[in-house]
Image: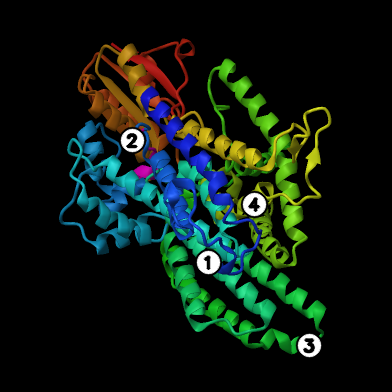
Amino acid sequence: MRVFFQGAFYFYKQIISLLPAFATHFLPLADKNSGSQRKHWHNWHRLPPFWVNPLLILIWLIVGISLRLVNLTAKPPWTDEFATLVFSLGNTFLSVPLDRAIAPDILLQPLQLNPAATIGDVIHNLATQDSHPPLYFVLAYLWMKLFPSDGGLVSLFGARLLPAIIGAASIPCVYVLGRVAFRSRLVGHLSAAMMAVSPYGVFLAQEARHYTLAILWVIGSLTCLVIATRHIQNRTPLPIWVALFWIGINALGIATHYFFTLTLGAEVVVLIFLAWLQLQTSNKFSLLFSPPWRRIYAVAIGTCVAGLIWIPTLLENENRGALTEWIRGSRVGLDWLSPIFQALGTLIAMISLLPVESSQALVVIPSGVVMLTFFIWAVPILLRGIKIQLQHPENRMMIQVIAGVVISAIAIFFIFTYFLGIDLTRGARYNFVYFPAIVVLLGASLAVCWHPPQEWMETEQGKNGITSIGKWGINGKKAVMLIWLMGFFSAVTVICNLGYQKYYRPDLFVQLIQQTSPTPVLIATTHKTYVHTGEMMGVAREIKRANSLQNPLFLLAHQDRDPNASTIALENTLKQLPRPFDLWLVNFHAPVAETAKICAISDTQSLPPVDGYEYELYHCQ
């Protein structure tokens, strides 16, 4: 790992040294045509100017894919990833027996490759047992056929490689969005550079889930919104190919994740704002039926049709309520403020995330101080960059549109949270619906920092006339580099599992069992949905990898509304097992059986807590 970081440091140092070279090609904030580019050969490695642009995109892509591939399988999969693995194989969780002791191999059977499964099985199992649309799972079904099994189970590397590659693909795509929105390659490159190192982007790309694919569709839809905005401004018809492309992107987005509709809702709010602005400049109501608006209405109708076809699937799915139970619930007292801090924390972590989740105070405190200092310095600079962009007529509307998407999406989150009782802020991953817009706004602000206007520059007295854009004597280009480096080190924090830590640590739990239980073990949990099956799959997978426990068994004690059903299943199982053995009750939310009470309960206060696994230990002699 040390060699990797030394090599990475040298590589990224060379990238940073290239930035001043490429900047000379993109001096204006808005370069409308290629005529503004210099016609001579560049001094850096004597490359012609037209090579610098694709070369930089390639560099950001290499940086992004490198960060997304490092330690790709180091962190154990969690319940949502197990759902992706099982359903993408065309398998089902229903094959796992309930209410009786089973061996780890039986629990892990849904993770075995299934040559007989078809795409139809993937779609059917999702429609009847899950709450997500099938597009990503079908792609993963085809993708994972390229990888051999890993110890008899599906390849975790193969499953995580797909979202990592798709996540890297968002880097050139967000370059296109930034360039189209602001007609500036500089904005495009800075957006791509920040996407490459965003800790939030790396976090999503290293999970075997569908969020990176959804981000691609968000970028595509926002690009179409930007193009439509220009046609509304110029009162020219939206090209038919753009309208059809927009409908197709929106349809694919909904088929990837239903929360993509939140992005569409934010876009609708922005379009209403644009219509209001147009009516303010002209009282002619007929403008709302002009050619650009007619095409936009057609896009809206096509998108609605693409979304409505999923309504029957949602209504027929009996499991959707149980699977989303974790984001529902009542609040008391200060709990009403939690969504605000959760939303703010996710916004911050899109740019910077140092090891503030560490268990060691000596790591948490310095990390928190550095992050706080960084934001005290960076936020005023970034806000001023947005303010200056708003002063340019060419860029004002684009800032309003993209910022409008962000503000509208966050407002929709809070409406769901406070009025509908569905706390979307609890899942940081759901913020994919506006993440690309944040990145492009960041790129637009950093473009001003890279070439700050003369009136912004401040000369520090007593420091040899050094020009800076802030209070600490840092000039614009150095400020951009520092912000990028903060993103890079934040991405390293994520890939080392020091930030955006996994909710479940079955690896630590299995180590604890190995150190504590010299006898055979029964690991019992209450079961309602496949989420609880996934929790135990994580433990079984780690046991299979360690191969050190003696004949471990699992019990998934099912319960619907009556918790005593799990108690009865536990009692019946305990009566059938030969002694001695250790009983581990893990996330067991039911009364403890009388038979278990006969066993000697262990003092678990002296044992370390494990993320995702609340446990009690009984020694049954």
Residue at 65% across / 39% down in the picture?
479
Q: Amino acid at mark 1?
A: Ser
Residue matched to label 3: 284
Residue matched to label 2: 73
Name the secondary structure under disc 1.
helix
Residue matched to label 4: 447
Q: Earlier in the sequence, mark 2 or mark 4?
A: 2
From what the image shows, is residue 447 above or below residue 230? above
Q: Earlier in the sequence, mark 4 or mark 3?
A: 3
- Kindly report which numbered mark, 4 or 1, lies closer to the viewer in this rendering: 4
Left or right of 108, for residue 65: right
Q: CA distance from mark 2 to mark 3?
A: 60 Å
Q: Earlier in the sequence, mark 1 or mark 2?
A: 2
From what the image shows, is residue 283 above or below residue 151? below
Which contiguous range is marked in magenta?
76-82
Mark 3 near mark 1, Cβ–Cβ under 8 Å? no
Q: Earlier in the sequence, mark 3 or mark 1?
A: 1
Q: Position of residue 229 (x, y in %)?
A: 64, 73
Q: Amino acid at mark 2?
A: Thr
